[in-house]
Amino acid sequence: MKNWDCIFDAIGKATGTKFSGAHLTPIGNDKVSDTQIISDGREEYFIKRAAADALQRLAAEVEGLEALRKAKALTVPRVIVSGLAGTWSYIVLERLRFAAATDHSAAQLGLQLACQHSITDETFGWDHDNFIGHNTQLNHRRADWVRFWCDCRLRPQLDLAAATASGKVLAKSGERLLESCDAFFNGYRPTPSLLHGDLWAGNWGVLADGSPVVFDPAVYFGDREADLAMTELFGGFGPTFYSAYSDAWPLDAGYGTRRNLYNLYHVLNHLNLFGASYLPQSQQLILRLLAEVR
């Protein structure tokens, strides 16, 4: 219990109230981290813990949550404390209780996301790299969005894939796509908007009062279309989300094509995280995009 005792002490110091954490309820786990609800009968918290060498990844998640909180557009869980506890790294967040999503809550999310995207910067990227899943996400500052997307998003994922037996088949077509990326931005110059960065259906929920909340961000300043594209990759947002967003800030006519370019990044990331089952989808997206520029 030594590691747990360190976490309980840190919660007590952060909240000013002694916390004993007598009850632990597992929620889920993946290859490198697990999540639990911890309770002492009075207070409950959500905790994500991983090995000590994951500290940088969890610290980036905390920074992302704080950046979104300061933006005051989307609701995010409050960070209680984070750090190292013996052989673990961890984040403690407020416990959120979720309800079923409704058309109204989805519309709220669309409107709030448009508000967040109105927060802009002078260049694309972030002040340092962070993570997309468990892979490093490069955030080198660029004034040119196309160069940023190619150099910091697509090329690193294509290089990771090329290092595997199955992913090598993407090398030639991937390189042709990188050379052709400018063609997708004729007449379109995106603004560096504050992005969630990993906005799929598993990273948003609805609170008991019906208000939407987001979590697990991979923030940076980029084209707002990249956030919208990911919401369509796996579904789970609904028509009222898109209509509310478009009413607040209509999308450019070329979004329908660029959506595939943006989602290719996440599909390649899944290929590199989870294996060859994502190879056919990666190949199809690349070929579809190349067909657009012939």
Image: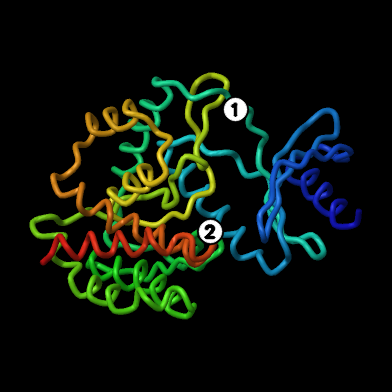
Query: Which residue is under mark 1?
Result: 98
Q: Which residue lies at the image location 27% right of the left edge and 51% below the top edge?
A: 259
Position of residue 194 measured from the top left corner of the image (x, y, whole percent): 36, 50
Please state which of residues 109 and 124 is positioned toward the viewer in this rendering.
109
Q: Residues within 10 Å of mark 2 (few under 14, many from 20)?
A: some
The amino acid type found where label 2 is placed reads Gly
Q: Residue at x 50, y 37 (%)?
A: 204
> Vertical placement of 291 versus 250: above or below?
below
How busy is the neighbourhood of tag 1: few (under 14 within 10 Å), some, or many (20 plus)? Answer: some
Q: Identify the secondary structure beneath mark 1.
A: strand
Q: Which quadrant holds the C terminus?
A: bottom left
Residue 74 placement (x, y as % from top left): 44, 36
Q: How many marks?
A: 2
The location of residue 19, given as percent across then percent down, is 84, 39
List x then y, in percent, for residue 128. Answer: 46, 67
**Mark 1 or mark 2, which has the lower sequence index?**
1
Query: Residue farthest to the left?
Result: 187
Residue placed under numbered mark 2 in the picture: 133
Which residue: 74% across, 43% down?
Answer: 36
The CA distance from mark 1 to mark 2 is 23 Å
Q: Is residue 200 above or below residue 33?
A: above
- Where on the picture, by quarter, is residue 41? top right
Q: Quadrant of residue 109?
A: top left
